[in-house]
Amino acid sequence: MPESTSTRIRLTRRSWHRPGALLWLVLAVSLSGCVWLRLLEVKNQLQEFDRNFRVTIAEQLVVQFLHPVMLSDDFLYLTELEPTRVEALPQGQRWLVDFHKLNAAGQIEKPLKTLTFTMEFNKQRKLTRFGFSPLFLAIAPPEFLEASIRSMGKGAVDTGHRQLRVDPQHLPKIAAPLPTHHRIIATFGRPLLETKDQGELHAFYRFIADTRPIKGNTGANRLAEVRVSFDPASGRLNRMTGKFVGLKLRINYRSLQATPAQAPKAKPAEHRLPVS
């Protein structure tokens, strides 16, 4: 199977590959047995996605965990960071983590451009909801992000190498339009760096988590990086690679986007509901 058409998750100890995968996640930590088993349980739940999860898209893309598994302590263990702030809920807590965009001098840019991710935990400290920042959806459109999450449940786990791979035939095809270079620059502002190679235009951004490291850790995970790659002719987004709190995410949108022949046909006008 060519790696360029696969979905891969790899959980390792400081092992960084660069396969041209559709979706690639790396947790750069040494996992304890309990955390690894809970991650595997979540992966197994993904196989029956609609039974175990619910996705809502408004300002945020929110994944609701109908049968929670992961613990708040797992977040602290995996990221080595405290949340930016904690809010009390009637049935638990909401944790928020802010990432502020940095300028070329390494300082927080003003006015603030902030990626905020939210997690909600119940009274048993289990993760019940995860919300992706509205600003993050500008570079990871919700239709593509949801399809990527769903596809992970169809992968085969290699427990020896702690790796998951999805067969290309199981990858969905999304008909939604992709954002352009102009739109992303208008949303995020000028990048730290723009380069052009291998027939693509690349823009680099850097963020810092507004949080403090867990006692005894260096805080290296506070720095986050995003690279977005575009087709130079059309300006359309091709790929996104991001690194947040030790998690590296890579989405190849070209592998996910449907061709005109694959896109569903529009319904006749008389079958559409009126919009007020």
Image (spheres, grey):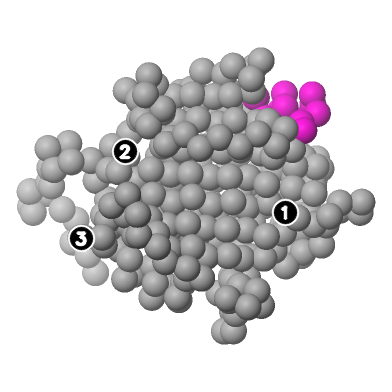
Q: Which residue is denoted by mark 3 in the rendering?
A: 233
Q: Position of residue 150 (x, y in %)?
A: 45, 34
Task: Name which residue lies at 82% across and 62% down.
Answer: 212
Principal secondary structure, stretch drawn in magenta: helix
Viewer-closest of 61 and 229: 229
Residue 31, magenta (yes or no) = yes
Q: Which comes sooner in the sequence, label 3 or label 2?
A: 3
Packing grade of label 1 (10 A; few <14, some 14-19, many >=20) is many
- Compare residues 201 and 51 and report the one nearer the observer: 201
Extreme residue in the bottom direction: 111
SS under mark 3: loop
Question: Along the horizontal axis of the image, is 88 left or right of 25?
Answer: right
Q: Can residue 174 be spotted in the picture? A: no
**Where does label 2 land, which residue?**
255
Evaluate whether residue 77 shows in this view: yes
**Amino acid at pointer 3:** Ala
**Crowd around label 3: few <14 · some 14–19 · many ≥20 (10 Å):** few
Q: Which residues are magenta?
A: 30-41
Q: Can you give x and y, in whole percent of width and height, for residue 255 in the image?
A: 31, 38
Seen at 58% across and 45% down, the residue is 248
111 is within the stretch colored magenta: no
The reply, left or right, for residue 85 in relation to residue 237 is: right
Residue located beneath label 1 in the image: 221
The residues tagged by marks 1 and 2 sit, at their Cα atoms, a distance apart of 29 Å
Q: Residues within 10 Å of mark 2 (few under 14, many from 20)?
A: many
